[in-house]
Image (tube, coloured by chain):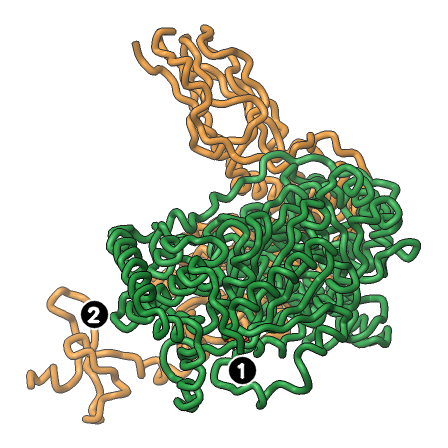
Amino acid sequence: MTNNPIHHRHIKTALTIRLVEEKFLQLFSEGKLNGTVHTCVGQEFSALAFAGQLKKKDFVFSNHRCHGHYIAFTDDVRGLLAELLGKETGTCGGIGSSQHLCNNNFFSNGIQGGIVPVAAGYALGNKLKKNGAIGLVYIGDGTLGEGALYETMNIISKWEIPLLIVCENNFYAQSTAQQVNLAGDIESRAAAFGINTYKGYTSSPEELLSKAEEVISYVRDECKPAFFLVETYRLNPHSKGDDDRDPAEIEKFRNNDYLEIFQKTNPVYYNQYQTEITNEIDVLLSDIFNDSDLALDKYYSPKVPVENADWMALDPIGKRQVELLNTFFKDKMVADELTVFIGEDILSPYGGAFKVAKDLSFIAPERTFSTPISESAIMGISNGLALNGFKPFAEIMFGDFITLAFDQIVNHASKFYHMFNKKVSCPVVVRTPMGGRRGYGPTHSQTLDKFLIGIDNVKTVALNTFFDPAVLYHSISSEIHPVIVIENKIDYGKKILNHQSPNYYYERTDDLYPVVRVRPILSKPTLTIVSYGGMADLINTILNDIFVETDLKPELIIPSLISEMPVHLIADSLEESGKLLFVEEGSASGGIGAELAAQVAEYTDFKYVFRRIAALPVPVPSVKSLENLVIPDKNRIIQEIKYYFT
Amino acid sequence: MALLQEIKVPLLSVNDTSLTIIDTPFTSGEKVDTGQVIVVFETSKTSYEVTAETPGYIQYLCSNGDDYEVNEVVVKIFSDSKDIDLSVETPVKKIKKLAPINTKEWSGETQFSSGAKKLLEENELSSDLFKGYDFVSKEDVMAIMVSSPKTKKNKLANSVSQMPKQTRLDIIDYKISSGKKIEIDYLSDVQQAGLTSTVHIYVDTAFIFGHLNNALKALKNSILPLVIYESSRLLKKYPLLNAFYNSDSISVYKDINPGFAIDIGKGLKVLNVKNAGELSIQHIEEKILDLSGKYLDDKLELEHLTDITFTITDLSAEGTFLFKPLVNFMNSSILGISSIDTKLNRCVLSMTFDHRITEGKLVAGFLQELKIRLESYRSDNQSLMNQDVMCFKCRKKLKDDLADVGFSKCITPKGDEAYICQSCFKGY
Ligand SMILES: Cc1ncc(C[n+]2csc(CCOP(=O)(O)OP(=O)(O)O)c2C)c(N)n1
């Protein structure tokens, strides 16, 4: 190990990090700190070498052990202290605390591995902006177990994204020693993707600093990714207590720690710096203690629901839904330089499994990204692009595959805005075709919509065949929060409002997310049916059969924003009909109908009958006869209406 | 400086809980004179004009084309135009309109449910009746059948709602409720021909409940279940009384479905005791109770109200001596039950019939036979009846008398005839 002297500026920063974290541990033991802290005592020079040597325009993504990275990059000690003390003046208003920081291009999140594709997306954004900024993402060695990392390494290498991955190898993941879980070799993992790899040690800061500088320049100048393995050791427990490591081992590393050595070799400087910094921290703290907590209404205030204003008549459009979608995206790609289209197999001439992306790669090749089979990375990269000001439209080839992107939706896209105390927003859009009736079988036909509503701060929109999908996509384009769009495989090929049942009036609200209503021209409805997407298309074609066979005069209400049902409109109709039916293509249990039932019950004060018709609780079979039984078809719907309501 | 008249949205029919305003001939602030039409409402069937009762200055609290709930004040007339605050244009809460289209101009092809089609066929109704409808369900057909018995024969003669109105100042007009209108239409069908006649007979009811009360669960001392039971059996012999006059022919029902009339707060309805000729007395009692329950709970369905071939109306609880029942639409006769005279131990049965179908002789024969049948229930075994004799002092029943001595007939201190047991008589 080399122990060349380094600039005292670095020593002071490293010592600041250490003293701040030790303060946290002290405050925690005094009961003044809520939650948890993961300190990087012993690892500080990794923060200095990378986060500390970036430019302001660059960015850093970090993980749970992020205080050092934060201070090294932002120099914002007060914001960090106040954040951990849960104060409004904290960097994220006390919402994020230790693991969720956001300030001037610095982001951290507590999901291991999840930030890697997000960082890649952010870096891709910089590459598209050609602003010369690069990015850095820190992971621990334990995180080498996460799949999202490898999806991302593949893509950043292939697409030459200027992202530096720094793996801080402290030989432990929480309580588990590395040899228990890690197979093979670390550096060759990155090398296998064709990524340049480097190595350094926090015990040799001078060498680490200069190697880091070199790698940073490589990433910036070559516009290529790099992987840097930092060997280091944390001298404190994983978080606050419990350390099962051999004390002798810890002691050995402590003796080798640069700051410890500096204290012994330069006691005068050390003591002087220590006193200075400690005083500084104490002064800040005594000030912070007077700050107040964030008020709830600054964090969350319920939305006042907007009553739908006007109704407008619907007209058929002699075009298939997929053509209209394709036209929308072609126009959008041309009109808006911040639009990005990303997904599997979307390059033209193929243009995506369902042809929504046809010709996009001809029109805007630099913003049309055909990805490997990596749903998690598709979603994560889209999230990163969205954080960086782009409007990404991510396509998940089949609805069933959206589960692989779920962490990115729930723990990243959904949370960023609030957990970073509204400093950023993530206007990502993910579109996917759901639904069966094409014989694709269990993993390509299921309707998973019920898992996709009820995600906080995420809108879930379902297209339908009653009006131009561009109306919805225009609204979606101007959202500043994430939107999931459920498309339907069968509906793609249908023309808009191709079928109109006789004696019904077809209309929609002029909301951002219009509600369609199909109601008897004169009669009072005696059955209110709510359905959406592909199922609504089917119901529309059998309205007359329902009437002829059940004697009930149905009114069909079709929401497009299925995460926020138009309960007042449904209740208006229900008040007349007294009977409410929800038909969904997914299975019933824990489903969208269940949510609707709860909301309608909470909203109304009159008696009515409610029923659901849904898929049977089994995977969708491929064989046609069975598929038609598992997913509600015309016969079943009519039979069940008769059974339930007459 | 006074409010002279206030016009509220009237309740014109049970179904119209709100009315549409279709004309407001003046504007707020204008002067109006007595007798001038000042507002016109539209109901589900007709339009309804309201005239000024006094000269004055008008203020509208409504706007044309909107719906208002019954009892809301929509127009005011003041003695002085200064009383009108024109700033309060339409403070009355409007009912949200669901339809942005003009529902009046509909002329498309009507859709019929299969249930409706069946009902039309069964009742030989023409689908033309439903011109202007979008959808016709079973209920719609039924509603037409009930509200307009003429539909059967497709003649839409002078139904009440179409009679010309006169304005007279010496009388007060009360609107006839839609329920009453239906009733009138219903009864006019047979009665308007003027060819009905009524025959009365009395039935000796002494001890008639002796056995009967043992058989009945709830309707003790009611003769209705027995009358339904016996008359439905007897009607098999008198098919013309289970029939109706159908233009130039007489239609005889194959089934015997007597209906009993009921009117306890929810309008006059006739409820069908289907196939009563095949039911036991107990079943008939159960049916009566069940149907009355449904009537009270508004749970009646089409089948409970239709296909009635013969009607029985029971006014025995109302202290009646004698009355003339009116024959129902699509029936040829109706049997009325008056109250039992407890002194004379008898009650009067009255049967009104359609003379176009049959004559008094046949009806008298029917009643005579019915009387014999009913009287056969009288307990000829006097002792059985006496079991119910009660001591007026201790209220002990003869059948509970363990002394085995018997009761004495006596005169009570009030002067009534009564019985007294031996214990009380001897003064223990
Ligand atoms: C997806 C996910 N799984 C598990 C955890 C719980 N967890 C937090 S830190 C940690 C260990 C991480 O080890 P490593 O990546 O080596 O980082 P270090 O803690 O050593 O800095 C674990 C398992 C988590 N935060 N996220």
Occupied quadrant, residue B272: bottom right
Q: Which chain is green?
A: A
Element carrying mark 1? loop
Instruction: Judge the density around disc 1: few (<14), some (14-19), many (≥20) Cα neighbours within 10 Å.
Output: some
Q: Closer to us: mark 2 or mark 1?
A: 1
Where residue A472 sits: x, y (%)? Answer: 70, 44
The orange chain is B
Q: Is residue A619 visible?
A: yes
State the image coordinates of residue A137 (x, y, percent, origin top left).
Answer: 60, 63
Label 2, label 1: how many angstroms apart (C-alpha)? 113 Å
Give above or below for B141 relative to B427. above
At 77% across and 70% down in the image, what residue appears?
A194
Question: In this image, B194 relative to A107: left or right?
Answer: right
Amino acid type of the residue that numbered disc 1 sits on in the rendered structure = Phe
Is residue A244 rendered to the left or right of residue B191? left
Q: Which residue is mark 2?
A: B417
- Location of the C terminus of chain A by quadrant is bottom right
> Which quadrant of the structure image shows residue B424?
bottom left
Q: Secondary structure at mark 2?
A: strand
Q: Amino acid at mark 2?
A: Glu
